[in-house]
Image: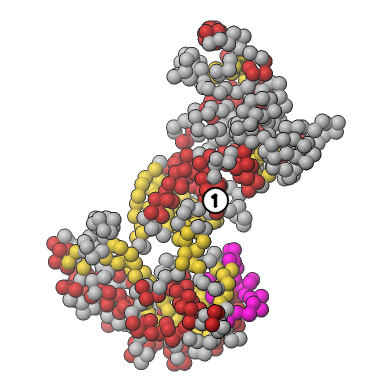
Amino acid sequence: MSERSQSFPPSSGILSDPSGPVPAPDSLRGHLVALENGQVLIGEDLRGQKDVDDYVFRISEYLERSGKPGALKIVYIPDRLLSDLLRTIHPPTDATETFYGNEFADGFDLFSEEENPETSGEPEPKRKNEEPDDRLPAPGSVPGKPSPESGGSPSISGQKNLIGEPLECLSSPREGTPSLFRAPAEIAPTVLLFSDGRFYVSREHRDNQHVNYYYRHFVPELWSKVYTDRPVPRPQFVSYEALRKIRREHFPEELPGDVYQAEGDEARKVMEIIRDAIRKRASDIHIRIEKDRTRVLYRIHGWLKPVQTLTHEEGERLARIVYNTMLDSSGRDTMFSDKKPQDGQFRQDYLPRGVFNIREFHAPTLGAGLGTVTMVLRLQYGSGGEAAQVTDIDTLGYDARHLAQIRFLMGLSHGIILFAGPMGSGKSTSMAAVLAIVLSMNPVEEGRGLHLVTLEDPPEYVIPSASQIAVPGGKFSDVLGRIMRFDANILMIGEIRDEATAEKAIEGAMSGHVVYSTVHSNDVLSIPRRLDGLKVRRDLLADPTIFRGMICQRLVPVLCRECRMTFRESEQSALVSEDLNNRIAGAGISPEEIFFRRKDGCQTCESQGIVGRTVVAEILLPDQEILDLVSGGRMTEAWRYFSEVLGGRTMMDHAIDKIQAGDVDPRDVESRLGWLHKGYLDRKTLQGIVGGFS
């Protein structure tokens, strides 16, 4: 065997493994590595020891029996490098021992100052009198394709590299292929080292200490020992997008939608969790990294449900993989931190079928830097990378009076219509359903169409014939000033969350547009007060020709009719407390009308006891009197006027109707709206509820 083939990395295994053909004795385990190609890498401190000489003699005998006489080659390397090498070959099962690079190796710098790749984000300049390195493609070229300068031929998967060996990715080898240069799972997606010496590093991740150690120390030191006849690879810094493109160019079998398969078990685990959550129609995934464990929970029909428990270390690795490799890199920190809140959105090639967007947010819990973090993934459903289709408004849960009021609002030619409620209350779903009907009432095909322009972060639903504009970061006020020249009849703003957006929305309503938007508010009469907090002028807040309609709502779980429990069954199961019984009676609900959720459910509801969620709402078509009362802070009088003069019904009134229809569990209503009561919550009603606890 030639010297060149002797120096090539192993292709079929490690001789010194306990299960290998020549296992190393216990005294040497962890201090040397014997490779199938005849190389024996030994820690420098063992030079000259008798047990090392004995073991090398056994390796020599094995190579002779295997038809490889003369292949033996002994290389002494620093213990630190050998330790890191062993950890890449056999990642420890205890995640706390996972190799992240020697964080204290900065004292050793392989590169001189003039060629240190950390000094610039651009490819390094050639030194004087230096011959071009034929191993590296020209700047801007795509590996695997001929360079204009070199006129070389493509080198793709399945072809030979420059020394006649099959081209392999050493940093992320295929499953079952050993590699001395395997990058740890946490950084594997950010580096790409090929067996022909080409070496790419993500520019966005270059300052990470683990990536930094890999390209500055681990690869150069080990390469000089393993490939004694080849120059040390010099990293080229490219964008993360380009890095992923290079991988796909070389390994076309890794389809874009499945590229995460090359990026470690943690990425596959994350995708399994997301797909399972999609199958169960979860709206959110919580990954709670606690001191001694990690809990994964799904929010299904508004309730959090634990689905699996992992170790603390597993959860930490999952969170890092999500943030460091799966999120769009624009507008966010480059690396995960457990010391501050961070957020982002998933990259398109990591979105499974069934969702068009996933938002990520995480923050430290129990104090920064303690390793306890909660990460929330918000699933936004759609298909094929597109937003979901709008839902028929008649199926959302509004009652007949609500629908009549909404249809009145659909015919307005100017003014603001606001949907309110906390996150997850169905505001965007209801607003999209209303707007879809408005456009269908004015078809473009008949020559009387309307132009609807939406500003969203990002668009959640496909509204036919609308111009839907994504506004990254939700900075709607930056776009609203120019949108007025977009020839729009109707404007939809994803959310009014700041003073500038509120001001622009009112300007639009006063200039002949209908403006739809959402706000976060507790109830329908708190909507003007919420806008007052955003510095909207009070004379404008009290103008019913500007504020035309206000809708506040919640979503309440719908009981499975196949397994729901009657009041009597629930009493026998001790589900009905005495104070709940008192509130049910105080609300005028007959026990025969009430049903409760069965904890374990049935086959029909997939063991959940609930089959969906329904809207409970209150709608205000304001007049001058009620706006004056609200702007003057006379809320009790305003609620009385809403109920007695305007004939308004509160969300609680609507929920009680659904309890009496057997559609919802009274306990679920209380979890969303507070204690059961009839009408608005005045002093007398409040005293009655408190008295029920005594």
Q: Is residue 92 above or below residue 283?
A: above
Q: Is residue 613 left or right of residue 61?
A: left
Over which residues does the magenta segment extend? 470-496
Quadrant of the drawing holding the C terminus: bottom left
Q: Amino acid at mark 1?
A: Asp
Residue 635: image quadrant is bottom left
Q: Quadrant where the N terminus lies?
A: top right
Above or below 600: residue 648: below
Q: Residue at x 50, y 66 (%)?
A: 460
Task: Look at mark 1 in the image and give the residue it sits on.
Answer: 349
Q: Quadrant of residue 538?
A: bottom right
User: Where in the figure is residue 505, as x and y percent of width and height?
Assistant: 57, 79
Number of residues whose C-alpha sits closer than 10 Å to that of mark 1, classed few (under 14), some (14–19) or many (20 or more): some
Give x and y (percent) for residue 209: 61, 40
- Residue at 60% of width from left, 25% of height from top? 81
Residue 407 in magenta stretch = no
Q: Is residue 333 left or right of residue 568?
A: right
Give the camera-side residue of 588 and 564. Answer: 564
Vertical order, 623 against 446 (above or below): below
From this viewpoint, is residue 636 visible?
no
Residue 412 can be seen, yes or no: yes
Of 504 and 14, which appears nearest the observer? Answer: 14
Instruction: Please state the horizontal and vertical placement of residue 301, each as a whole percent of the image.
Output: 35, 62
Residue 474 is a magenta residue: yes
Q: Residue at 55% across / 54% down in the picture?
A: 348
Name the element at disc 1. helix
Residue at 47% over, 64% down: 388
Residue 53 location in percent, x, y? 56, 8
Left or right relative to 602: residue 515: right
